[in-house]
């Protein structure tokens, strides 16, 4: 769908899955954005939101798998998605480069999520028409 | 820095339950012409006898339905309506 | 784009304030105008009298004191919240501006951001 008034959005998720509703609300919002013809520049995970990028989350089979549902959308729409590296390292969300650097036992970053600094968020603030945050409720 | 009288009409997106300290902070920040959208736990405020919401407060339909908050005078919007509100407002605060 | 990062959570019990501070420092590092507002329980960030060694954390006032050095334009502290906790201007770290109304401060910024 094309939209003459199409806007560029950045979505920032700061609430973790299974701790908050943030990843779910953000996913529904993202789908509605794309249906309306808007573009998503980037999804940025910050604070507890980085848990969405864990490849090890294993909910019971009769529950929605929020990381997997997000991956599906990111891959389908080729949306860049980054987890803040400082938030991620503290919370044990590790890509292969950080695993090697810190000589850790494993890596668990779920592709296509990547880790990057807050600079990505700063850039989004400058370039996106809208930045929408999905926070936890604590 | 713009003068406060020049602040554009603001969309306030609130996801906290009424007990959360940020709920009161958000309500106090409402200015004439602003729009308040309640999502997630904030929708239960529609049933809260102790809270007076601004006229024309919106609530996200899916979250209201999930919590058994039925139709009220307030406007329920779906996710497309949520998107439309973010199109219309250049200034948005996520509380 | 003038951004206000708001810290409304008490220090130490959650990481939210530290992550708000990181956001402010990052904007400043990229030469984006940014200020901080401490309100509600967040005013405890600015107290001089803090020592977090016994809980194994870094004292947040130290991080906060560096805000000006890192290019954060102003550090605003809600006066009503200070009153509530019995905090006087003298008990706050250097560089704080007491503001009578958080609401008026919010209106002065293009973007108002919480870290959590």
Image (tube, helix red, strand yellow):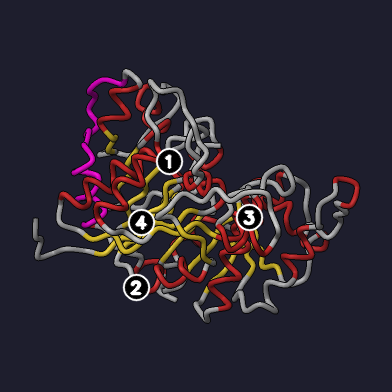
At x 22% / y 34%, what residue is drawn? Answer: B75
Chain under numbered label 3: A
The picture quadrant where one finds residue A97 is bottom right
Q: Residue at x 47, y 28 (%)?
A: A59
Relative to B71, does residue B58 appear above or below in the rendering? below
Q: Which mark is residue A127?
A: 2
Query: Could you say which disc has been placed on residue B47 in the image?
Result: none
Q: Are marks 3 and 1 in contact (CB under 8 Å)?
A: no
- Chain identity of mark 1: A
Q: Are marks 1 and 2 on the same chain?
A: yes
Instruction: Decide if residue A63 is on the left or right side of residue C17.
Output: left
The image quadrant where one finds the N terminus of chain B is bottom left
Residue labelled with disc 1: A22
Q: Position of residue A35 (x, y in %)?
A: 16, 49
**Start and end of the magenta stretch?**
B69-87
Distance from disc 1 to disc 4, alpha carbons, whole Å, reads 17 Å
The residue tagged 3 is: A89
Seen from the viewer's position, the closer of residues B39 and C109 is B39
Query: For the residues tagged 3 and 1, is the chain the same?
Result: yes
- Secondary element at tag 2: helix
The kind of secondary structure element at disc 4 is strand
Question: CA gap, disc 1 to disc 2?
Answer: 23 Å
Residue B73 covered by magenta stretch: yes
């Amino acid at each position: 769908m094309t939209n003459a008034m199409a806007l560029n959005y950045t979505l920032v998720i700061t609430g973790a899955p299974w701790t908050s509703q943030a990843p779910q609300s953000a996913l529904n919002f993202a789908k509605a954005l794309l249906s309306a013809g808007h573009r998503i520049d980037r999804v940025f995970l910050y604070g507890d939101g980085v848990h969405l990028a864990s490849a090890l989350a294993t909910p019971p089979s009769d529950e929605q798998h929020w990381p997997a549902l997000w991956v599906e959308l990111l891959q389908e729409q080729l949306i860049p998605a980054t987890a803040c590296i400082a938030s991620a390292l503290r919370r044990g969300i590790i890509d292969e480069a950080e695993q090697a650097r810190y000589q850790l036992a494993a890596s668990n970053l779920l592709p296509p999520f990547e880790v990057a600094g807050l600079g990505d968020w700063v850039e989004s603030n400058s370039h996106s028409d809208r930045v929408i945050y999905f926070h936890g409720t604590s | 820095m713009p003068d406060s009288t020049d602040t554009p009409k603001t969309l306030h997106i609130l996801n906290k339950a009424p007990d959360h300290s940020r709920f009161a902070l958000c309500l106090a920040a409402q200015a004439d012409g602003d729009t308040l959208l309640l999502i997630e736990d904030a929708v239960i405020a529609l049933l809260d006898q102790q809270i007076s919401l601004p006229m024309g407060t919106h609530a996200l339909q899916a979250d209201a339905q999930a919590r058994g908050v039925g139709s009220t005078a307030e406007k329920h919007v779906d996710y497309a309506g949520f998107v439309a509100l973010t199109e219309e407002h250049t200034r948005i605060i996520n509380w | 784009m003038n951004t206000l990062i708001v810290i409304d959570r008490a220090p130490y019990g959650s990481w939210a304030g530290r992550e708000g501070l990181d956001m402010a420092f990052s904007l400043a590092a990229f030469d984006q105008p940014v200020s901080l507002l401490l309100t509600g329980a967040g005013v405890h960030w600015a107290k001089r009298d803090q020592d977090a060694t016994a809980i194994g954390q870094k004292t947040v006032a130290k991080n906060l004191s560096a805000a000006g050095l890192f290019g954060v334009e102003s550090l605003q502290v809600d006066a009503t919240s200070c009153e509530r906790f019995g905090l006087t201007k003298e008990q706050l770290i250097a560089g704080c501006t007491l503001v009578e109304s958080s609401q008026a401060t919010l209106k002065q910024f293009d973007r108002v951001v919480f870290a959590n």
